[in-house]
Amino acid sequence: MPIRVRMLCAALVACALLPIAADAQDVPAEKLPIARYVVDARVSFPKFKQDAAIANGIGVGVLNLPTRGFGLTAGAHWYPLRIGIVTFGVGGEWVRARRSRTLNTGTEAAPVNVTTNTRFSTLAPQISFNFGSRNGYSYISGGIGQANYTAERADHPLPDPESGSKTINYGGGARWFTKKHLAVSVDVRFYAINPQLATATRPGFPRMTLMSMNAGVAIR
């Protein structure tokens, strides 16, 4: 084939591809798929139980037990597959939270201040079903992992458990990307924790479900 003909063919192909490339660049963000990876960093507010069995186990009253905890959540997710309107994700999260409460169990004239600490941590894989586009999407997710829950008097601290309790986490949330790589991230999650049996050094804790509200940022 003569050189001029080959050059003409190459030019025609390039001209034909230009509109396709331009169209790809002009696709609005609401039609683009969710990015492959995202990392979350959020502040957590788990609601701890004021349960009589927990209070009796550590020798305090129910009102001695803290309620709303404070902590941090970190997570990472990968989105390998999209089918129709659903993008499937796999990842995991780490949570650590605690709270203290001091209560006068004596009288005003003879106060007896008792401080109770509650702490909670978990590490768990998750799968998620995500709905939306690159700049904003909601999701439902869940997984099975291990969690540690401890309520203790400050003057009688307890050792950490030898192993975590099986815990199912489930919930949902959303991410809104206000910047190219930065989003506002919110999540509401429930943790169904198996009962912890009493040992020589720790009291038993009953089966419980904790709810946690979380808010922070996501990076992609």
Image: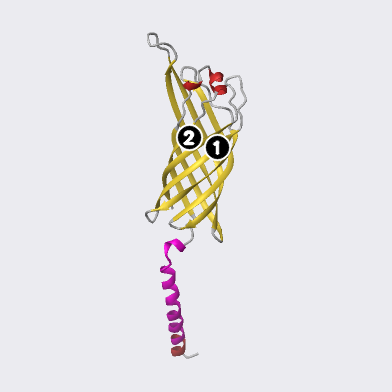
What residue sits right under mark 2 in the picture?
46
Mark 2 vs mark 1, CA separation in Å: 10 Å
Residue 137 in the image: above or below residue 70 = below
Q: Which residue is mark 1?
A: 191
- Rate crowding at label 2 as few (under 14), some (14 to 19) or many (20 or more) other CA atoms within 10 Å: many
Query: Which three-letter amino acid code belongs to the residue tagged 1?
Result: Tyr
What residue is at 43 percent from the left and 72 percent from the top?
23
Q: Are marks 2 and 1 in contact (CB under 8 Å)?
A: yes
Which residue ends up furthest to the bottom in the rendered image?
A: 2
- Vertical comparison of 193 with 202: above or below: below
Q: Position of residue 76 (x, y in %)?
A: 49, 47
Residue at the farthest top position:
109
The residue tagged with tag 2: helix, strand or loop? strand
Q: Amino acid at mark 2?
A: Pro
Residue at 44%, 25% in the rendered image: 100
37, above or below 208, in the image = below
Identified at 53% across, 23% down, the residue is 159
Q: Please tell me whether residue 19 is drawn above or below residue 108 in the rendered image.
A: below
Front residue of 119 and 212: 212
Query: Can residue 90 be found in the magenta stretch?
Result: no
Residue segment shown in magenta: 8-31
Instruction: Please identify the dominant SS of the magenta region.
Output: helix
